[in-house]
Amino acid sequence: MAIPQPARPDRRTLHHRGPVQRGPHRQESHRRGPRWWSELPLVIVVYAAYSAGRLLARGDRSDAVGHGLALLDMEKRLGIDFERPLNRLFTSTPAVGIPADFAYASLHYLVTPAILVWLFRRRPRGYRAARTWLMVSTLLGLIGFTLMPTCPPRLLDAGHGFTDTMAQFSSYGWWGGEASAPRGLGGMTNQFAAMPSLHVGWALWCGVMLWLHGRGVVLRALAVAYPAITTLVVMGTANHYFLDAVAGVLTMGAGLLLTRPALLLADRVRARFRTAPRGGGSAGTSTVVSGGCETSAGEHIPGQRTSSAGAGDSTPAATR
C-alpha cells in the first residue's frame, strides 16, 4: 500500500506569504531596540539638567582659586605640572594655539553627539550601554563641579605664568574671553567647572567607542589620537590642570562601573510601569470589558445586574 505524500506547496504562492516568524524572542528584542523619538528627548533632558546644574554649581571664587592653587602645588611636588610649557608653546606659536582653541571650543560638542548618532544607527546593540555610560559619567562630573569648584589656570593671577590663549586669539573665532562661550554669553557658563575635565572624559568615551565599534586602521588611530590630543589641548589652552584630566578619566571609570546597575534599575522601572494596571483600575477590579453585564433573552443591550450585600438575590432583571 503506497503511503500518500504531502502535496508540495506551489512555488508561486511562496512569494505571497507574509514574513517568516522567528519566534517571540526575536520579536521582543526588536521591540526593545532604541527608538529615536524616545532617545532624543532623553538625551536633551539629561544634557539640559547637566547644563543647568553646572551653572548652579558655580561655587565661591576664593574656594575655587584655593582648589586650583592646591592642585598646582601638588603637581609641582609630583613633577607632573605639564601645563606651563604647553601653555607657553600654544601662546607663542599661533599655528598651534589657534587650531587648539578651535578644537577646544567645538569638538567637545560635535564629536560626542556625532558618535552617539553613529552608534544609534550603525551599532544599535551597543548603543544603550554606551549612552548610559556617558550619561552616568556626566552626572558624576556634575557632582565633582559641585563639591570642588576649581579655578582653571587661565584665571589665576598672571604671576603664576599662565596665559589665556582663547582670549589672546579670540579675534580668530566666535569665543570671547570667558572659556569657549560665544561673545556676550560668558555668563551662561561656569568658569570654575574645571575638576574633573569632561572634555577629556568625553573624548575618552569617544575613543573607546571608536575602538570597540569601528573598523579599519583609520578609526583605530583616531580612537587613540582624539583623547590624547584633547588632553594636550585642555592643558595648553590653560583651561585645565593635568590632574583635572586624570580626574576626568577616573570619572569615566566610575561611570563605567555604574552603567550595569543603572541599566538594571531602568529595566525594573520600565517593567513596573508596564505591569501597572491601566485605566485607573485597582486590584480586584475585573479587567473584562463587559464584567458584571449579562444579556437576557430578547435583550440587545446588556443590563448591569448587581445583588445587594445581604439579600443574596441572583434573579436576573426582567426582560425588556
Image (cartoon, rainbow, N blue to C red):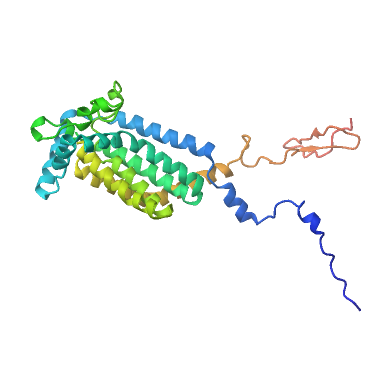
Vertical order, 273 against 171 (above or below): below
| Spot occupied by residue 174 in the image (x, y as percentages of width and height) | 30, 26
Quadrant for the C terminus in the image: top right
Question: On the rendered structure, is 19 left or right of 41?
Answer: right
| Spot occupied by residue 187 in the image (x, y as percentages of width and height) | 28, 23
Question: On the rendered structure, is 104 left or right of 122?
Answer: left
Whether residue 148 appears in this view of the structure is no
The residue shown at (70%, 52%) is: 19
The residue shown at (25%, 25%) is: 171
User: Quick one: which residue is furthest to the front in this view?
Assistant: 95
Vertical order, 188 against 72 (above or below): above
| Spot occupied by residue 149 in the image (x, y as percentages of width and height) | 22, 34
| Spot occupied by residue 26 in the image (x, y as percentages of width and height) | 61, 54
> 305 or 120, which lies in front?
120
Quadrant for the N terminus in the image: bottom right
> 148 or 34, which lies in front?
34
> 69 or 317, which lies in front?
69
